[in-house]
């Protein structure tokens, strides 16, 4: 296939979204619409993919860059001096599962821990409106870049440079909290900043959990877990 015959961004976005629907990662029309609308490539002008035991770097202008941006894999976007990845755009299938598990309703306000590239905040903003999305990241440079890319995509949620483990009390209480960064347990500020009945979806240990905040600020897993691949655990596991 020549470069001129290569699929467009819209076609690649459609293929990725269709794949997420077929595999059950996307289960609702609003999230399907979000994935169809938000241009992932805008948030990852440069990234690295782990493939065949090695790393392959893609940059805007590379003929393979656009198609690579729509693979169902995590795109590594920042590394420290030791070569360890410190930021990425999460694998779309996992991102979709976590967003579905949030079980958001129109009018809900979401606190996202880990702004990263800003792509996930764009999906949330498309679904709920930018005024209902707050995203926090410890890296000020990531926040600045995410803000620029979100604005280019037409979204202006609240972005905060700070310690995500402390949440963001200025906009509390929230209805939902989504954390893609790994934690050992749910920090107390997260529970305190959610309304009773609020939902936390987070990466704890080696699995993704969905927890509901009780009136006493404890967290419990739902009695009837949502279908999908989420690993349900007690809050402090």
Image: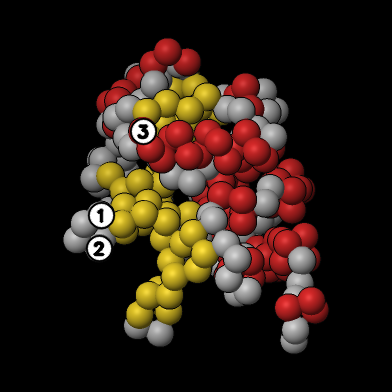
Distance from the alpha carbon under mark 3 to that under mark 2: 20 Å
Q: Position of residue 97 (x, y in %)?
A: 55, 54
Per the image, label 1 sits on a secondary structure element best described as: loop
Question: Which residue sits at x=66%, y=56%?
Answer: 26
Query: Of the residues under marks 3 and 2, which one precedes in the sequence?
Result: 2
What mark, if any, has residue 140 been given in the picture? 3
Q: Position of residue 201 (x, y in %)?
A: 45, 42
Q: Are marks 3 and 2 in contact (CB under 8 Å)?
A: no
Q: Quadrant of residue 213?
A: top left
The answer to whether residue 106 shows anywhere in this view is yes
Whether residue 169 is situated above or below residue 1 in the rendered picture: above
Q: Which residue does the numbered mark 1 point to in the structure image?
A: 80
Of all residues, the one furthest to the left in this rendering is 82
In-front residue for pair 210/49? 49
Distance from the alpha carbon under mark 2 to that under mark 1: 5 Å
In-front residue for pair 55/93? 55
The answer to whether residue 113 shows anywhere in this view is no
Q: Position of residue 46 (x, y in %)?
A: 49, 59
Q: Which residue does the numbered mark 2 point to in the structure image?
A: 83
Answer with left or right where residue 208 lies relative to residue 58: left
Whether residue 233 is situated above or below residue 178 in the rendered picture: below
> Pointer 2: residues within 10 angstroms few (<14), some, or many (20+)?
few
Q: Are marks 2 and 1 in contact (CB under 8 Å)?
A: yes
């Amino acid at each position: 296939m020549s470069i001129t015959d290569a699929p467009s961004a819209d076609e690649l976005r459609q293929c990725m979204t269709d794949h997420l629907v077929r595999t059950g990662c996307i289960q609702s029309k609003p999230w399907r619409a979000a994935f169809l609308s938000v241009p992932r490539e805008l948030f990852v002008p440069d990234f690295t993919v782990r493939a065949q035991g090695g790393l392959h770097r893609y940059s805007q202008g590379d003929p393979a860059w656009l198609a690579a941006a729509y693979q169902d894999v995590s795109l590594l976007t920042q590394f420290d001096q030791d070569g360890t990845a410190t930021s990425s755009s999460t694998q779309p299938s996992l991102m979709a599962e976590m967003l579905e598990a949030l079980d958001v309703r129109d009018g809900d306000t979401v606190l996202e821990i880990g702004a990263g590239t800003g792509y996930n905040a764009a999906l949330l903003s498309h679904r709920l409106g930018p005024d209902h999305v707050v995203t926090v990241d410890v890296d000020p440079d990531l926040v600045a870049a995410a803000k620029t890319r979100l604005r280019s995509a037409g979204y202006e949620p609240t972005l905060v440079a700070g310690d995500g483990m402390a949440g963001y009390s200025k906009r509390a209480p929230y209805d939902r909290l989504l954390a893609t960064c790994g934690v050992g347990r749910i920090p107390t500020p997260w529970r305190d900043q959610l309304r009773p009945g609020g939902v936390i979806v987070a990466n704890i240990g080696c699995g993704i959990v969905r927890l509901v905040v009780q009136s006493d600020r404890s967290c419990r897993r739902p009695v009837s877990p949502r279908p999908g691949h989420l690993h349900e655990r007690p809050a402090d596991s």
